Image (spheres, rainbow, N blue to C red):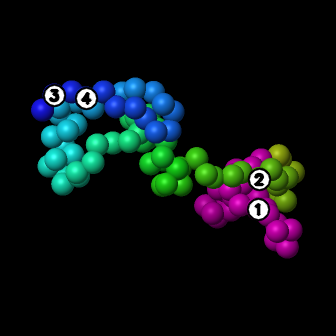
Amino acid sequence: MQDQTLTCIDCGKQFTWTVGEQQFYKDKGFSNPPSRCPEDRAKRKAANMGMGQRKDYPITCSNCGKQDTVPFEPKGDKPVLCRDCFKKQRMGA
């Protein structure tokens, strides 16, 4: 085996598939070389795992009036707290 130069199907950039990586693929039983460069493989993996998919929604705290964000869409039927008030409430203070 020797290093191979491959072309990424996503960005078109050339990347090197090293002998060590080839051995790893062989050990795992993979028969095809990677079709994406390491950067695009990482992006795709992150997208598949849902990383970076979180959307924050702006709110005004129902308790103190402070502006903040929450990781869910407030429906308006329940009070929504800022991070500080939420922590205080959970701690029983």
Tag 1 and tag 2, C-beta contact below 8 Å: yes
Q: Which residue is mark 2?
A: 57
Three-letter amino acid code of the residue under disc 4:
Gln
Tag 1 and tag 3, C-beta contact below 8 Å: no
Sequence-earlier tag: 1 or 2: 2
> Is 47 positioned to the left or the right of 28 in the image?
right
Q: Which residue is mark 1?
A: 73
The C terminus lies in which quarter of the figure?
bottom right
Q: CA distance from mark 4 to mark 1?
A: 48 Å
Q: Which residue is mark 4?
A: 4
> Is 50 positioned to the left or the right of 31 in the image?
right
Q: Looking at this view, is 82 or 17 the one in front?
A: 17
Residue 80 in picture, x, y percent from top left: 79, 62
Taking the spot 82% from the left edge, 53% from the top edge, the residue there is 59
Sequence-earlier tag: 1 or 3: 3
Q: CA distance from mark 3 to mark 2?
A: 51 Å
Tag 4 and tag 3, C-beta contact below 8 Å: yes
Residue 52 in picture, x, y percent from top left: 58, 47
Residue 10 in picture, x, y percent from top left: 50, 38
Label 4 element class: strand
Say few, some or many: other residues with alpha carbon within 10 Å of mark 3 (under 14 / 14 to 19 / 20 or more). few
Q: Which residue is mark 3?
A: 2
Q: CA distance from mark 1 to mark 3?
A: 53 Å
Label 1 element class: loop
Q: CA distance from mark 4 to mark 3?
A: 6 Å
Write down the region rendered in magenta.
68-93
Taking the spot 69% from the left edge, 52% from the top edge, the residue there is 55
Q: Nearer the viewer, mark 2 or mark 4?
A: 4
Three-letter amino acid code of the residue under disc 1:
Glu
Three-letter amino acid code of the residue under disc 2:
Tyr
Q: Nearer the viewer, mark 4 or mark 1?
A: 4
Residue 77 in picture, x, y percent from top left: 85, 73
